Amino acid sequence: MARRKNALRGHFVQEYIPDQEPTEDGWLELANYISTIGDDTQEETEDMAFYDGDGTLESDIISVAGAYTPEGYFNPDDPAQALIASLKYKTGDGRKIWHKVVRSDGKKEWVGRATVSAIVAGAGDASAYEAFSCNIRFDTLPKETDLTTPPSGE
C-alpha cells in the first residue's frame, strides 16, 4: 500500500452558472500558496433501538455534507483564489461554485455544486503575508467518477 502526499490530491473550482453543468476546460486549480486543506465534512446521525436487538441504540448516518477548508496566503492574481475572493460580498446563489476533488492517485474524482463560506482574502498581522481561507461545502453528495474506466462509447 503506497502512501501519497496531500499535495497530489487536486482541488479545483469553477464558476457556477445555474442550469449549466461544469465545463471540462473551466476548472481552476486551488493550489497556489495553499499550505493546508482540512476536511470539514459534517455527518448527521439518528439513533434508534429496535425490538429485534437488545435495546442498544444504533446510529444511522442520515446525511453527509462533504466540506474542505483551504488555507494559505492570498494571491489576487491566482484565478482560483480570485474567483473565491469575488464571492465574499455575495449571498444565495452568488456563493455557489462547482468543486472537483481528484484523489491523490488520480483514479477517482468527486464533482458537485458547492457553497463557499467564511471567505478570508487578505487579513492578518501587519508583518505577515495576507491570509487566504474559506470553507467549500458540497450542497449534495458529489458525483463520484472512476477515472480508470474509459467513458462509455469508447
Image (cartoon, rainbow, N blue to C red):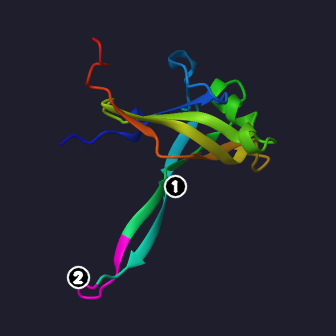
Across and down, in percent, residue 10 comes to 45, 32
In this orientation, which residue lies closer to the viewer: 59 or 52? 52
Badge 2 element? loop
Q: Which mark is residue 52?
A: 2
Kindly report the secondary structure that dominates the magenta region of the rendered protein: loop
Residue type of the residue flagged with mark 1: Asp
- Quarter assignment of residue 14: top right
Task: Pick out the residue farthest to the top.
Answer: 154
Magenta includes 60?
no
Q: Which mark is residue 40?
A: 1
Q: CA distance from mark 2 to mark 1?
A: 35 Å
Across and down, in percent, residue 145 comes to 36, 32
Q: Is residue 6 above or below residue 47?
A: above
Question: Seen in the image, is 21 located left or right of residue 116?
Answer: left
Q: Is residue 50 above or below residue 74?
A: below
Decide: few, some or many residues near mark 1? Use Cα within 10 Å; few <14, some 14-19, many ≥20. some
Residue at figure coordinates x 30%, y 32% from the top left: 105
Across and down, in percent, residue 119 comes to 71, 46
Residue at figure coordinates x 30%, y 85% from the top left: 56
Magenta range is 51-59
Residue type of the residue flagged with mark 2: Asp
